[in-house]
Image (tube, rainbow, N blue to C red):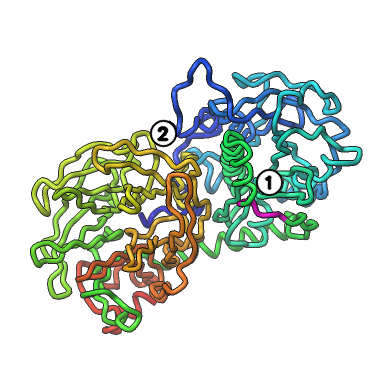
Amino acid sequence: MPEERGQSAATLRSAPGIGAAAFETMTTDPITDTAPSPDRTFALRLAVLVDGDSVPGWQATLLQRLIADRTLEITSLVRAGPEATASPRWAPGVSARLADRLDLTVARLRYGGPWRRVPIPPDAVVEVSGLQGVPPVQGGTSGTDQWAAAEVVLDLTADGLARRCVGMQRGPRALPVVRLGQVALQDDSIATLGRRETIADRPFAELAAVLCTGDEVPFRVLRAGTYVTFRYSWNANRWLLQHKAALLLHDALRQLGRARQGGAVGWQQISARLAPLPTPPEPTHEHACGLRSLLRVLTRTCRRGLEKRLSSEQWCLVTHAGVATPQSLDRMQLHTPPAGHFWADPFALSRAGADWVFFEQYDFAVERAAIWAARLVDGHLLDQRPVVAPPYHVSYPHLLEHRGELYMVPESYHNGGIELWRCARFPYRWLRERTLIDGLSAADATIFAARGRWWMLANVDRTGLPDHADELHVFHTDDPITGRWLAHPDNPVVTDARVARMGGAVIHRPDGRLIRPAQVGGDIYGSGIQFMEITELSETGYAERPGRDLLSWMAEIPRIHHCHATKRVTVADICRVMPWRARLGLAAHGTRSSCVGGSHDARDDTA
């Protein structure tokens, strides 16, 4: 869906007003939960180390998620004492505090006002005693009673978490070593989280949940994530990354709990997969957020706003007879939608000697899309009609043939789940069959058969923003139509905004390899297509790597985010960035077809 841009300004402006309270009520994925039994034992018991009797809002969110997770138990909540506290490696000066206040004010006015429905709340401090199910805070860390039942310590203190992991093992700040070690967020300081990426204009921010066991390897990475940087406010970026960090730490603890349940074998398996983490580098000037840094961010914001005012974007379709190659790029046919619409997410299907294209048509007047179908004849899209048009937004019409029936799995998270539609009369009559997975905000669900089971890859949002660019989840079943879809235990199997988002149907190579088209993520939506080779796919494991002999030649077309090919036709979507003349109505509009490289105006429009 082209209007969604990860953690960009467009996402923030379209986010629902959930606020911090909604995060505090989030629970674990209902699909992975099981009913508790009287003799149920917890997979992992943990003690949580905090700075005081109050915690930031994102940490309260994390604590609520841990309480709701029936595989984890918080045995104690411990206030960090002087023996566990070190002076921070970075402290803001007067200029930094003033710039931070101005940035926060601009962020709330620009992105977080009530008319924009964006949750950028103040730095809420939540009293731990007010969180239901959390044990009372115990003072100091020198005692042993509070650590007796814990198997791991979760460090949520704010003054250099990864640095303290080393100090836990020796010296005046040493903490009692529990059975499995300490888990912390790898960062110089929570105070700088999300700050350096925005100030230095880094396209992505990297977070890692690290495990410190006190052996010869000081750090091991339990979970790592790469997220799109919000480049126009470091406070907005910090707020977003904090809640991503809450999800990342929760996933890391669940992973650790599964390893504990597996005994020595499970621990050996997870240890072999944990990469060592080098000692965090010393802080640099990129941490500083003075008035000069604020001026750079504001200049960047104004430049981007001016670019959007002076240009216009329109997502279109391109088609090619047969399987497209780099040499045939200039012969792909361009199809532009009517004014006030865009076309995206095309899927091709051949029936009775005819080629059909199913695609999303977004209507700016009603601010939602429907699924349309058209017959492809000699490079022209004929007989265009809507086929799935419910009173809510749908897109990404993934097609599935099973036991002689044709099905569609459109993106339908606006209706609260992943829906299945059946074709009652090809190609224009479709009926809603059932909801495959209810209560899940998932985009671009893609179903395929491999290795004796049916699999679903989907981009799931667990924050409520919505933001479906960061995480790829896997589900599996024995029957795609009537079976119960089970969540993969390692979900999310990919936490990387650069390649997590699906960009089309999974490709089955003749040699048995599975290729996943992935959108190249970034601040600008539609940066390209990266083909990922799935190297491991089972009920307990998933791994992938960039395809070695598959070139992302589609990236040669500016702004593309989806492609699909059959033996007879290749379809994709591209974004035409039109200059200011188009906004004044001087450019041609309407449905037309032309060769991408075969006419002067087509080359100009896609440049």
Q: Which residue is mark 2?
A: 31
Q: Residue at x 70, y 33 (%)?
A: 152
**Of the image marks 1 and 2, the number of the one nearer the N terminus:** 2
| Mark 2 secondary-structure assignment | loop
> Distance between the Cα atoms at labels 1 and 2?
27 Å
Left or right: where does residue 285 sit relative to residue 15?
Answer: right
CB under 8 Å between discs 1 and 2: no
Assess disc 2: are there few (<14), some (14-19) or many (≥20) residues with their C-alpha within 10 Å of its C-alpha.
some
Name the image quarter holding the N terminus. Answer: bottom left
Assess disc 1: are there few (<14), some (14-19) or many (≥20) residues with their C-alpha within 10 Å of its C-alpha.
many
Residue 489 in picture, x, y percent from top left = 48, 40
| Mark 1 secondary-structure assignment | strand
Work out whether 9 lies above or below 601.
above
Q: Which residue is mark 1?
A: 210
Work out whether 392 lies above or below 363.
above
Work out whether 197 lies above or below 106.
below
Q: Residue at x 41, y 34 (%)?
A: 31
Q: Amino acid at mark 1?
A: Val
Q: Is residue 318 visible?
A: yes
**Viewer-side residue, 164 vs 567:** 567
Residue 402 in picture, x, y percent from top left = 20, 49
Residue 433 picture quarter = top left
Work out whether 155 lies above or below 349.
above
Q: Residue at x 20, y 46 (%)?
A: 389
The reply to whether the magenta stretch includes residue 524 is: no
Residue 342 in picture, x, y percent from top left = 29, 60
Left or right: where does residue 239 sit relative to residue 481?
Answer: right
